[in-house]
Image (cartoon, rainbow, N blue to C red):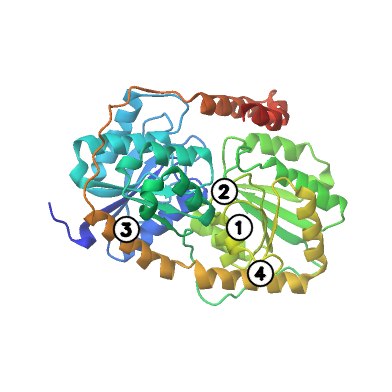
Amino acid sequence: MTHLKTDINTSFILPNGFDLGGVTTWSVELAERLALAGRQTTLVRHVDRYVSSDISPPDVRLLECSHPIHPNYWRLFKKDIDAYVQSYAQALPSIIIPNYSFGSYAACACLARTSADVIRVIGMAHTDHSDYYGWLVRFESIIHKFIAVSQEIAAHLAVLLPHRQGDIVVRPCGVAVGGKLSRPYSLSSQPLKLIYAGRLSERQKRVSDLVKLSVMLSKSGVDFELQIYGSGRDQSYLADLIRSLKKNVRQRIRLMGQVAPREMTSFYRSSDIFVLVSEYEGTSVSMLESMAQGCVPVVSDVSGTAAVIAQGKNGFTFPVGDIRGMEEKIVCLDQQRIRLEQLGRNANQTIRNFYSYEDYVPWFSDILDEVWQQRPRPWQEQQFSFYFPVRQFMTETAYTLASKPGLRWLHRLVAPIKEIIR
């Protein structure tokens, strides 16, 4: 079957529904921009009990996967994978981008067993974490192209898949930049405005460190406001931590909840500093988006930051968990508002020069055309009957228990448990 370039459907799987995570915002924005360029695009939305919003662009087809089991649940049966297959099959013929989760990749593998001629798969290496590498390695035989969002991820993936090095390309996700930056920065007589946007989760995002940072800034006498956008498993845990603070700190932090990704542009533009305390990332999309709107990034030094942030010129990075170092730098920026503005404008220029969608969309379109012309990659292995990764089960069980009222003290055991598992 021959298809013209413009009638090749490109499908993005959204395992967490329309959350405020970077993968979701990238998928939705890119799908819309590809549609505006004349390509058929589809968003396959899984249900998510933490997210109820619908932000599907009008020119993009939306498919709903209403199966209640998350595709990265620690235990999946054949019936779960079959439910995903039923939803994904509606998008064929298509280039499918599973994004993340075992279940999404497994469903694509099942489709590649029966319909290999009308499916192509792009493996997005979004995050520098063993889970992502595990999915990409496990299903590499059906993946036509790997896109790593940082050089560190690409190097690791090349070690794991030496025979596929020629199929690995490196490019951070594109972001919207807009016209010439026109925005205010807080005056020295005004509170310093900090912002965080993303999943509210202790695993990876370490959201409790946002509370620690707030306490330290308050003790240092910084007049600040911290707005936290997003939702997730640990949102109630975070809310409890904030409620337990003294009033003078508590009143400086606002949980803003889930908002549509496109609304974040104005929120970033009215903020001074973007904070990220994650344990691991790929190249953080929210960091790039905030920098595009002139925020100064003060972030943990994880995958992708070294290539984007020139220390002291357009932002600052710190070792994971170094909240004291982050606090000290924010104190300096609070006292040097002229420098704060200059760094913010430098951050905007960095994104404008290297990470704008204006360059990213044509590049990604070429990748799509290249992938569709490649030979089919049928799945040769047996069908799935049961999925139960012990390591993931232990991790997910620990975090799930720790999110429950009365058991949140378990978060204090995360670090020593990780050392034991290693």
Residue 164 point in image, percent of width and height: 36, 49
Residue 363 locus on image (x, y percent)? 37, 65
Q: In this rendering, does residue 177 appear at all? A: no
Nearest to N terminus: mark 1 or mark 3: 3
Seen in the image, is 172 located left or right of residue 215?
left
Amino acid type shown at disc 1: Thr
Label 4 SS: helix
Mark 2 or mark 4: name the one nearer the start of the chain. Answer: 2
- Residue at numbered disc 2: 281
Crowd rating for badge 3 (residues with CA inside 10 Å; few <14, some 14–19, many 20+) = some
> Is the residue under label 1 in contact with that under label 2 (CB below 8 Å)?
yes
Comparing 335 with 53, the one in front is: 335
Q: Nearer the viewer, residue 61 or 52?
A: 61
Q: Which callout, 2 or 3, points at the residue further toward the start of the chain?
A: 3
Picture layout, residue 392 above or below residue 165: above
Please give the label number shown on residue 59: 3
Q: Which residue is mark 1?
A: 305
Q: Are marks 1 and 3 in contact (CB under 8 Å)?
A: no
- Give residue 26's position: percent from left, percent from top: 45, 55
Tell me if residue 173 comes above or below residue 406 in the rendering: below
Tag 3, which secondary structure?
A: loop
Amino acid type, mark 4: Gly
Say if 95 sits above or below 336 in the image: above
Q: Which residue is drawn at the image coordinates 47% and 46% (left, top)?
A: 159
Where does label 4 land, which residue? 344
* Residue 85 in view, yes or no: yes
Residue 138 coordinates in the image, percent (x, y): 39, 36
Q: Who comes first in sequence, dot 1 or dot 4?
A: 1
